[in-house]
Image (cartoon, rainbow, N blue to C red):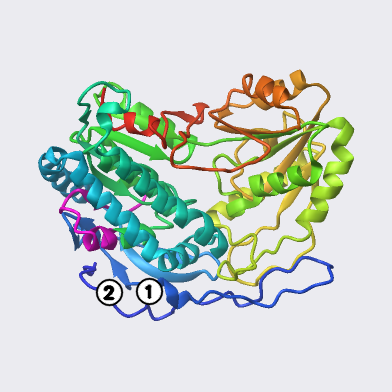
Amino acid sequence: MAKNTKKTEAPAAAPQAPAEPAGKPAGGLFGYAPAPESPAAAGDIASSYGHFIGGQFVDSSGSEALKTVNPATEQVLAEFARGTAEDVDRAVAAARAAFTYWSALPGSERAKYLFRIARIIQERSRELAVLESIDNGKPIRETRDVDLPLVAAHFFYYAGWADKLDFAGYGPNPKPLGVAGQVIPWNFPLLMLAWKIAPALATGNTVVLKPAETTPLTALRFAEICRQAGLPKGVVNIVTGDGSTGAALTAHPDVNKVAFTGSTPVGRAIAKQVAGTRKKLSLELGGKAANIVFDDAPIDQAVEGIVNGIFFNQGHVCCAGSRLLVQESVQDELLDALKRRMGTLRVGDPLDKNTDIGAINSAEQLARITALTDAGEAEGAERWSPACELPGTGFWFRPTLFTGVSQAHRIAQEEIFGPVLSVLTFRTPDEAVAKANNTPYGLSAGIWTEKGSRILWTASRLRAGVVWANTFNKFDPTSPFGGYKESGYGREGGRHGLEAYLDV
């Protein structure tokens, strides 16, 4: 495994646009000229990467390498090391050695590094947005307009807290925990990194982070940003690999804090793994959010919220509004408007600025989405998708709507993690709440109504960590995020996100 001590030329097969044009919605008076972002804006991608340990890119102790591909083209972007237990040992040792110095710094000094990282992220936002789209498959307008601004905002926000921890509500002079082992998913690679690293560093902890095996590139580019910002060696370490690497990290005896975002089955396994230890644990897991539309809701506004709630990031969102609960009296009107809107969605090249829905992240995830939608049809639900052309290579799935769904259907109970919406109906507010809460998850929900009293009445009865009113998928670094039941526990973001990294 070659060290990534310097950038190399782009790999033999450079990133390129899909072989066929972006998916076009059927009908309509106006066409869209292609508006592609240049893949060259992502900068040089090394042919192979090692780990980032102690401030340097180093070889793995093992010989196995994994590959990351562009989901829109199935083209190999780079190879990266499959981390071993020995690699994790080295990274944790580097983080432990750096902790003595980092935790002793005044908060105002730690804040300087976080502010510097935030500014560099802003300066390199185009590069990072393009790289994220290439490696993940999400549309460039989402990485450019949503992901990267939020990444920078989280570092700015927690930089502001670094010298104010005495006033955060956790007692005088709260102490950091030590070394944080963090495992992040593939749906928001750089944003999940920011959610975890920013509060950890602000509170004086050091970090060993493992990115997802399908999307390691922006985490490795973030390692370069840490060096550019002059962050002390060992404060942030990045070990790439698969599930076995993550398991070695979360099980490591010298890790004081484990933070995981991902699937509920893996989160359950981690909870069992750390049970009986002194490790502090936070889990942000799956969801099956209900988006509730009452009969007095503004239909056009609700339709936009529904579309954003389920088709944003191809539905690869743990808090996606994947269950639409609509009051019976407005069902037909809402579904007609929703189908018209879905017919305008453009599916295709993630680097085209006109694209609404990009590529599914991996062949494995596409197979899962396909299997669950097939099960929905087999169980009697009625499936509908707008007509659109799809590129000939890559991993793609049309935006899909199911009606005639009952609460017993798998598509109403299991997290699909794709652009698939299940529609259920209700007659009364009590029935809406009962159906919304009839899920093993409890991460998020949405309410659409013109009555403030109805919003408050419904929200107070929903068992969900985040409830949006007349909007959906709105995030802010000052606001805590997390769930109940099988959606995990602990909060990230806001003042509450500091607690996970403090000995209180």
Q: Dot 2, how many residues are within 10 Å of its Cα: few (below 14), some (14-19), or many (20+)?
A: some
Q: Nearer the viewer, mark 1 or mark 2?
A: 1
Q: Which residue is mark 1?
A: 43
Mark 1 and mark 2 lie on one chain; the one further toward the N terminus is 2
Q: Is residue 138 magenta?
A: no
Q: Residue at x 76, y 74 (%)?
A: 31
Side of 106 where 421 appears, left or right: right
Side of 202 where 19 appears, left or right: right
Q: Which residues are magenta?
A: 223-242
Q: Which residue is mark 2?
A: 7
Q: In the depicted view, which residue is nearer to us: 163 or 237?
A: 163
Mark 1 touching mark 2, by CB under 8 A?
yes
Query: Could you say whether the residue bearing mark 1 is in a helix, strand or loop?
Result: loop
Side of 493 where 436 appears, left or right: right
Q: In the depicted view, which residue is nearer to us: 23 or 393?
A: 23
> Does residue 166 show up?
yes
Q: Position of residue 97 (x, y in %)?
A: 10, 44
- In this rendering, the count of numbered labels is 2
